[in-house]
Image (tube, rainbow, N blue to C red):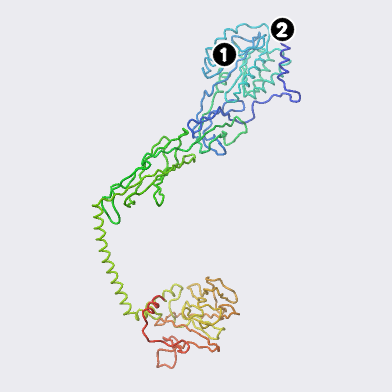
C-alpha cells in the first residue's frame, strides 16, 4: 500500500512542478504595499451616483480597516472624483473556506470535528460563508461537503469521519485539490478564500519539499491563505507546514490537547484571522459625465492607480434627454385680455400675466438634477427669456412660471409662442419645439371713447405748449437782431466773453495774462531777421494770423510752416516746453533734433528751433528766456496784441505798428496800453457797415 501511495505522490509532483528552466521558488505572499480589489460590477441604480464594493488588502491578503474616506478617489474615463460616502462592512462578501484533513494515525479526528464545529458555531456567518470539507486517506482525496452555505449541512458529515488509519497519509494532495477548486471558481480577490489544514505527520518526506513550493505559488496566485492545525509534535511535519503558512500569510497552531467545539484555544490565532478576512468597503461618488456607452473606472488609494485589473471595473449607461410636456398654454389656445381703462401712454388690461405650466420626465428612467431651465417667449419680432433658473431637486417634476405681457397693448390678435430649454447636471440638453398660441387684446367701446377724449385733451395741451415755445423762439431771435452788435462785440477777442474764454485757455496751459515785461524772446533768423517779444506763458506759432499768435510767413506763402505749427508753454515748476501740433505733420526741430508730435519737449535758453523743412521753406529762431525780476504784474487792461510779421516778396519786413494811448508822450512806452494800427493796403480796409443776420451767426459760431 505504501508503494502505491508513493507512486501516486511522484505522479502528482511531476504534474504540479513547472517545466525545466522554470524551477519553482518560495515567494512572499505579495509585493509590499496595500492593494485594492473591486468586487463585482458597479451599482448604477441611483445614477448619476455610482456605488462600488471593494477590498483593501495588505501583502498577507488581510483586509485593511479604518482607512479614511479622503484617501479614496475614483478615476472615470480620465475624470477624477472624490468619494461622497464610505462604509466599512465587517461581514463583507463572506468567506470561501476549505477544511482539509487526513486520517493518518497521528491526526486527531476529535480535533478535526472540534475545529469545524467551533468555527461554524462561533465565527462563521450562516448563509454567507461557503464551506467545503476535503479528506485525504488511502483512497486519495474526496470532498465530503462541497460549497455549502447551510451550516446545518456542514455539521452532518462530521459523524462520518471517526475512523483513523494505522499509517501516515499526506494532506498536501487535499490542499492541492482545494487550491485547484479556488482557482476554477475565478473569485480572485473579490471574495476571501482560505484553506485550513488539520493533520498530524506527513508521509513521503523525500517529495514534500517540492510540493510545498508548488502549493505556495498557487496560493499566492489565487490570493489564498493556508492555515495549519498540527495534532502531533513531529518536527519534520512542523517544518513543512510552517513553510506553507509563512509563504501565504497564514497561521500554524499545535494544540496540546484535543480541540472540542467549546474550546477557545484557537480563537485568538486561527479563528480571529479567518473572521478578519471578510471586511469590505462600500463607496459611492457622483459622476458628472453625460456620455453614453461603456465607462471604465479605477479606484485610487492615496491617489495611486495600479495596473492590476482587480483595481478597475466598468459599467454601461445609455442617457436620453429629458422630456418636457407643456400643460399650459396649449397649442393653438386663445388668451383674451380686456382693456379696463386708458392711462397714457397705453391701456390697462384686466390680465397682465400668462401662466405657464410644464412637467419634466426622464425617458431613460435616470432622474437627474436640472442645472438650468430656460423658459423662452416668442413674439412676432423677437425672443425673450421669461425665466432662467436652476432645478432644486431631482424628485421635482412640475414647474410653474408667469409671462408678464403688460407691454403688449396692440389691439386684436397677437401670435405668441413658448419654448423650453433644459440642461441637466450631466450636460445633456433638451430643446422643445415651440408651442404656439394667440393673445387677443379686446378694447371695449366705452374704453375706446374715453381714450379718444383723453387724447384730444392732451393734444390741446400740446398745441398750447408749441405756441408758447414758438413765441419764446421769436422773442429770442428779435433780441439777437436788436443786440447783434453788442453780442458780436462780447464774443470778440476784446469783448468780455472773448477775454474770459482766452483767460480760461491760458489758465489751463499755465498763462494767466499779458505781463508788463517780456518773459521770453524769439530771435528770428528766417524768413526775416527780427526779435519777437513774448509777454504771456502760452503762445501759438505758425503761418495763419487768425489762429496763431506769432506768424513767420504770409497766409498764402509757399512754405512748410503750418497755419498752427507749434505751441510755446511755460509751466510752473517745469519751465518752458514746445509742442509740435502741425495738422500736416510738418516737423519741429530743436537744435536739429526732431521732436515727437503732440508731446511736450523741454526748451532751454539759447536753443535754436526750426519749424518745417529747410528745403521747403522753414522758420528758424533762437529761443531766449528773459530772467525774471520778481515782478509779475500784469498789464492793467489785460489785453494781448502779439507781434505779427508778414514779409513781402521783396523781403521787406512789415510789422503791425504798436502805438501808445498817451498822445502827450513822444513814443510808445514799455508797459503802456497799446492798440493796433493796420495798413489798409496790406490788411484791407475796415468796413463800418452793419453786419447782416448771417454774419452775426457766423461770428457766434466762431
**Residue 1 - label:** 2
Q: Nearer the viewer, mark 2 or mark 1?
A: 2
Tell me the quarter of the picture where residue 159 sits: top right
Quarter that holds the N terminus: top right
Q: Is residue 217 left or right of residue 608?
A: right
Q: Marks 2/1: CA distance?
A: 30 Å
Crowd class of label 1 (few under 14; some 14 to 19; many from 20; radius 10 Å):
many
Crowd class of label 2 (few under 14; some 14 to 19; many from 20; radius 10 Å):
few
Where is residue 192? Give x, y as percent: 58, 23
Q: Is residue 344 left or right of residue 114?
A: left
Q: Is residue 231 visible?
A: no
Q: Is residue 333 above or below residue 35?
A: below
**Residue 315 - label:** none
Tell me the quarter of the picture where residue 700 sits: bottom left
Quarter that holds the C terminus: bottom left
Where is residue 118? Give x, y as percent: 54, 14
Q: Which residue is mark 1?
A: 116
Considering every residue shown, the one lying at the far right of the view is: 20
Q: Is residue 16 left or right of residue 409?
A: right
Going from N to C along the chain, the mark reached first, 2 or 1, is 2
Where is residue 504? Give x, y as percent: 41, 74
Nearer the observer, 374 or 547:
374
Secondary element at image label 1? helix
Q: Is residue 622 visible?
A: yes
Amino acid at each position: 500500500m505504501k508503494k502505491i501511495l508513493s507512486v501516486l505522490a511522484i505522479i502528482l509532483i511531476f504534474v504540479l512542478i513547472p517545466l525545466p528552466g522554470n524551477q519553482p521558488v518560495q515567494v512572499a505572499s505579495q509585493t509590499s504595499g496595500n492593494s485594492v480589489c473591486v468586487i463585482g460590477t458597479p451599482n448604477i441604480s441611483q445614477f448619476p451616483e455610482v456605488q462600488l464594493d471593494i477590498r483593501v488588502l495588505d501583502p498577507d491578503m488581510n483586509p485593511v480597516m479604518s482607512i479614511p474616506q479622503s484617501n479614496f478617489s475614483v478615476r472615470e474615463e480620465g475624470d477624477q472624483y472624490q468619494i461622497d460616502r464610505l462604509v466599512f462592512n465587517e461581514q463583507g462578501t463572506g468567506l470561501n473556506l476549505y477544511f482539509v484533513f487526513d486520517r493518518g494515525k497521528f491526526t486527531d479526528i476529535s480535533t478535526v470535528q472540534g475545529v469545524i464545529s467551533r468555527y461554524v458555531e462561533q465565527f462563521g456567518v450562516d448563509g454567507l460563508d461557503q464551506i467545503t470539507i476535503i479528506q485525504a486517506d488511502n483512497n486519495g482525496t474526496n470532498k465530503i461537503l462541497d460549497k455549502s452555505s447551510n451550516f446545518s449541512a456542514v455539521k452532518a458529515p462530521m459523524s462520518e469521519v471517526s475512523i483513523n488509519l494505522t499509517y501516515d497519509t499526506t494532506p498536501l494532495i487535499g490542499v492541492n485539490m482545494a487550491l485547484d477548486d479556488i482557482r476554477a471558481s475565478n473569485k480572485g480577490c473579490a471574495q476571501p478564500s482560505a484553506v485550513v489544514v488539520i493533520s498530524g505527520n506527513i508521509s513521503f518526506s523525500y517529495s514534500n519539499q517540492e510540493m510545498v513550493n508548488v502549493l505556495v505559488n498557487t496560493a499566492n496566485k489565487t490570493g489564498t491563505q493556508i492555515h495549519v492545525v498540527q495534532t502531533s509534535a513531529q518536527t519534520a511535519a512542523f517544518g513543512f507546514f510552517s513553510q506553507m503558512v509563512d509563504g501565504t500569510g497564514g497561521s500554524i497552531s499545535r494544540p496540546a490537547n484535543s480541540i472540542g467545539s467549546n474550546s477557545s484555544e484557537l480563537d485568538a490565532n486561527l479563528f480571529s484571522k479567518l473572521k478578519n478576512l471578510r471586511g469590505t468597503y462600500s463607496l459611492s461618488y457622483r459622476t458628472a459625465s453625460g456620455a453614453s456607452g461603456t465607462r471604465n473606472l479605477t479606484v485610487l488609494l492615496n491617489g495611486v492607480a495600479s495596473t492590476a485589473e482587480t483595481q478597475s471595473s466598468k459599467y454601461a449607461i445609455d442617457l436620453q434627454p429629458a422630456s418636457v410636456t407643456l400643460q399650459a398654454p396649449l397649442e393653438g389656445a386663445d388668451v383674451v385680455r380686456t382693456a379696463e381703462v386708458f392711462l397714457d401712454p397705453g391701456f390697462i388690461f384686466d390680465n397682465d400675466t400668462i401662466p405657464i405650466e410644464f412637467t419634466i420626465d426622464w425617458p431613460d428612467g435616470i432622474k437627474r438634477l436640472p442645472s438650468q431651465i430656460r423658459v423662452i417667449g416668442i413674439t412676432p419680432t423677437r425672443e425673450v427669456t421669461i425665466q432662467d433658473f436652476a432645478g432644486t431637486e431631482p424628485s421635482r417634476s412640475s414647474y410653474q412660471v408667469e409671462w408678464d405681457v403688460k407691454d403688449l397693448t396692440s389691439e386684436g390678435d397677437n401670435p405668441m409662442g413658448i419654448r423650453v430649454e433644459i440642461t441637466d447636471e450631466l450636460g445633456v440638453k433638451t430643446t422643445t419645439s415651440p408651442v404656439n398660441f394667440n393673445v387677443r387684446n379686446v378694447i371695449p367701446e366705452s374704453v375706446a371713447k374715453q381714450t379718444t377724449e383723453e387724447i384730444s385733451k392732451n393734444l390741446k395741451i400740446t398745441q398750447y405748449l408749441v405756441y408758447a415755445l414758438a413765441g419764446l423762439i421769436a422773442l429770442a431771435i428779435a433780441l439777437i437782431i436788436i443786440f447783434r452788435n453788442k453780442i458780436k462785440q462780447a464774443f470778440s477777442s476784446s469783448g468780455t466773453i472773448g477775454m474770459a474764454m482766452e483767460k480760461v485757455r491760458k489758465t489751463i496751459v499755465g498763462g494767466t495774462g499779458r505781463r508788463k515785461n517780456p518773459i521770453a524772446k524769439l530771435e528770428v533768423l528766417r524768413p526775416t531777421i527780427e526779435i519777437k517779444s513774448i509777454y504771456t506763458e502760452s503762445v501759438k506759432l505758425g503761418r495763419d494770423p487768425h489762429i496763431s499768435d506769432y506768424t513767420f510767413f504770409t497766409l498764402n506763402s509757399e512754405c512748410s510752416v503750418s497755419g498752427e505749427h507749434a505751441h510755446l508753454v511755460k509751466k510752473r515748476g517745469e519751465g518752458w516746453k514746445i509742442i509740435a501740433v502741425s495738422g500736416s505733420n510738418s516737423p519741429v526741430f530743436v537744435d536739429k533734433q526732431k521732436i515727437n508730435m503732440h508731446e511736450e519737449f523741454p526748451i532751454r535758453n539759447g536753443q535754436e528751433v526750426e519749424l518745417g523743412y529747410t528745403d521747403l521753406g522753414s522758420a528758424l529762431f533762437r529761443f531766449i528766456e528773459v530772467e525774471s525780476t520778481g515782478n509779475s504784474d500784469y498789464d492793467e487792461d489785460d489785453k494781448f496784441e502779439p507781434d505779427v510779421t508778414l514779409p513781402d516778396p521783396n523781403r521787406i519786413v512789415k510789422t503791425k505798428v504798436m502805438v501808445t494811448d498817451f498822445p502827450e508822450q513822444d513814443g510808445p512806452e514799455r508797459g503802456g496800453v497799446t492798440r493796433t494800427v493796420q495798413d489798409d493796403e496790406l490788411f484791407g480796409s475796415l468796413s463800418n457797415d452793419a453786419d447782416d443776420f448771417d454774419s452775426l451767426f457766423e461770428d457766434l459760431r466762431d
